[in-house]
Image (spheres, helix red, strand yellow):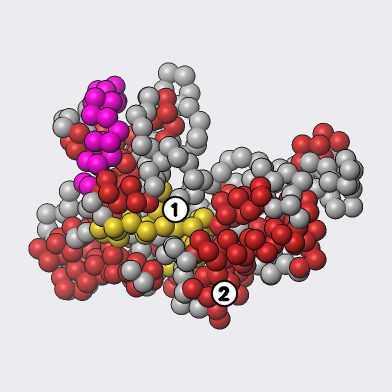
Amino acid sequence: MLPVELPVTVRDALLAPLVDHHCHGVHRDDLNRARFELLISEGGAPAPPGTTHFDTPYGMAVRRWCAPVLDLEPHAPPAVYLSRRADLGAVEVNRRLLAAAGVVAFLVDTGTEDLDLLSAAEMGRHGGAAADELVRVEQIEQDVAESAALAVDYLDTLGEELSARAARAVGLKTVVATRCGLDFDPARPSRGSVIAAANRRLAAPREPLTDPVLLRHLLWSAVDVARERGLPLQLHTGFPTSAAPVPPQPDPARTGNGGRGLSASELLLSGLVAAPEPPGPHRADPVRLSAFIAALQPLSVPVILLGCYPFHRQAAYLAGLHPHVYVDVGLALPHTAGAAARVMEDLLELAPFHKLLFSSGSRGLAESCLLGALYYRRALGTALAGRVRDGEWSAADAARIAHMIGSGNARRVYRL
């Protein structure tokens, strides 16, 4: 699995238990082929007729590296792999694959509170590891919006809920990139604009939040809580991004329907507004966060850029530029598979080594946790082997940096 020329000390450092500082729960129940294929693709859509998502670098990686953990030969055909998965059952599959990742602590984004996914505690039990929670702030906002009666109640309760949930968590996370893109106004919005936006929000509280004013308010509220409790703030950037269009926001000057304002769909149908640009991949470039990141620097809130690919070089540059910024590429490594070493080389070229973190970025499938850890070790091992071979680094330095990235940096940033 690792380059044969690696010194023993470096090999041991790479194989040491990892802190997976960002992952999601995996499905607790058995999955049919259609559902499994959706989960090994980042597009969220079935493969075209006559094709399969197994014909991707990630799909090939599942067959090569996960099959032996399920007692199959490497490169088992997809049908054989899925049949064996079903025979073992989800509990045993999850236990084997999570344990094989070699993770000592999972930091789990509980996200959408999907009961089909393992909780943080269950992830820890299945993987034989410690586990802590990462709070996704958009989910808290959704809960508050559905229960608040008035805009003032919404604002007061939002701050209280963020603080209460943060008391039990090791970090906060936002997916603002998928809601409105990262090119938002970095300034804290005025209270008047927030109250007006909250009134519009409460007219359709079950819809995902896409109002840029409320998203900025939510983000700055999270910053306040993170600063108060000494927690890092994770921002998802780059790969993958949501392809869903953002509904248009009501114009406060145009109200009706009993004063509640027109809904997003009503506005589109009426022709009063045009649908805004969806938050596509180009709007998830972390460079677009530069002004917001600079505004946070005096507050000493650690900012962790997640995902990042294919903008990982930009993210690594920001980590080198700002003392409070960290970077991690998560699922980009198993999805690039054989090319993962090139991604790792880019990170090592631009980011200080104490700013790099490991995560599997796993979502839905225990396979993603194992592959995240495996390709991280392979990619970093290849990079370290070259540096030691060329005499650029000593074996001791290479081993020390492997420990830093694999677990030490996360323990420091999250105070584990």
Closer-to-camera residue (303/25): 25
Q: Name the image quarter holding residue 22.
A: bottom left
Predominant secondary structure, magenta span: helix
Q: CA distance from mark 1 to mark 2?
A: 22 Å
Query: What mark, if any, has residue 348 been given in the picture?
Result: none
Residue 374: percent from left, percent from top: 25, 49
Vertical position of residue 252 compared to residue 55: above or below: below
Vertical position of residue 164 compared to residue 148: above or below: below
**Left or right side of 395 for 294:** right
Amino acid carrying label 2: it is Leu
**Left or right side of 160 for 264:** right
Element on which disc 2 rests: helix
User: What residue range appears in magenta?
Assistant: 77-101
Query: What mark, if any, has residue 109 been given in the picture?
Result: 1
Q: Residue at x 27, y 23 (%)?
A: 83
Query: What mark, if any, has residue 296 been given in the picture?
Result: 2
For the C terminus, give its image quadrant. bottom left
Q: Residue at x 76, y 55 (%)?
A: 150
Q: Residue at x 43, y 18 (%)?
A: 50
For mark 2, does the 10 Å Cα neighbourhood hold few (<14), some (14 to 19), or many (20 or more) residues? some
Q: Name the image quarter holding residue 297.
A: bottom right
Closer-to-camera residue (149/239): 149
Is residue 235 something that shows in the picture? yes
